Image (spheres, rainbow, N blue to C red):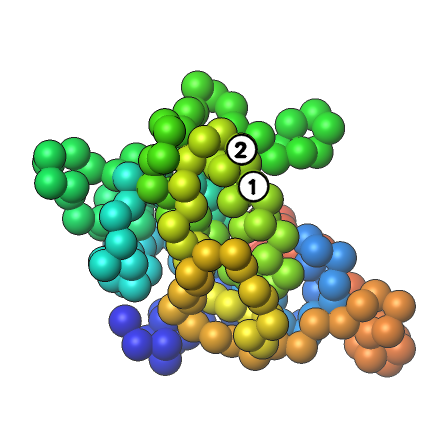
Amino acid sequence: MRPEEVIRLLESVGAIRQGHFELSSGLHSGTYVQCAVALQHPRYAEQLGRALAVEFHDLRVDCVASPAIGGIVLGHEVARATPARPDGSMARAIFVERDARGLMVLRRGFEVGPDEHVLVVEDVWTTGGSTYETIRVIEQAGGRVVAAGALIDRSGGQLEFPVRAEALVDLKIENYDAADCPLCRAGSAAVRPGSHFLGAMP
């Protein structure tokens, strides 16, 4: 898929919205991207996952790992679209999640084998924090992270991962520290987007 096709798809289902938002990173923004609105539709999820998998067709990928919750569906679809290995086996899809201490960990019986080639996948990069954490968890578990991918990079090209990184769309969106947010200064109150909020929006 070309970048403009991805944007058009996301806009058509309301996955890109305008307003005043407080992101999970704590930053404020006038634009919010909620890929889950698109990924809830299996046809779109399959289409987007296949498009992202193509970006890594030249790599050996044994497993796709994603940060919960946003990357789970996409990671599953990328794994499903990844070509079979020479022995006919298919890539697995696993995810990391936060424990009671707030640290990203592997749970639910997920394991990574020695030197297993892992692709880390997330829906949107803003600060890249969740992807960095996922890479750390996989490497500590013994896996070899070969690349990282996302549907959208909204960092303005500022992220530098320790592995090859590819995003389907580079979407330049201004982010602001809460203490220096022009939307706040204009008197607008930031909202934390979530399923209830998005469902209430026209």
- Left or right of 48, for residue 189: right
Q: CA distance from mark 1 to mark 2?
A: 6 Å
Q: Residue at x 47, y 21 (%)?
A: 108
Look at 52% across and 56% down and name the residue there: 162
- The residue beneath circle 2 is 140
Residue 53 higher or lower than 181, as above or below: above
Residue 164 is situated, as x and y percent measured from the top left of the image, at 42, 61
Relative horizontal placement of residue 179, taking residue 7 as reference (left or right): right
The disc labelled 1 sits on which kind of residue?
Arg
Q: Residues within 10 Å of mark 2 (few under 14, many from 20)?
A: few
Identify the amino acid type marked 2. Gln
Residue 43 location, x and y as percent? 26, 54
Secondary structure found at label 2? helix
Q: Quadrant of the N terminus?
A: bottom left
| Between 156 and 190, the one nearer to me in the picture | 156
Q: Which residue is mark 1?
A: 136
Q: Where, by quadrant of the figure, is residue 85 drawn?
A: top left
Numbered label attached to residue 67 = none
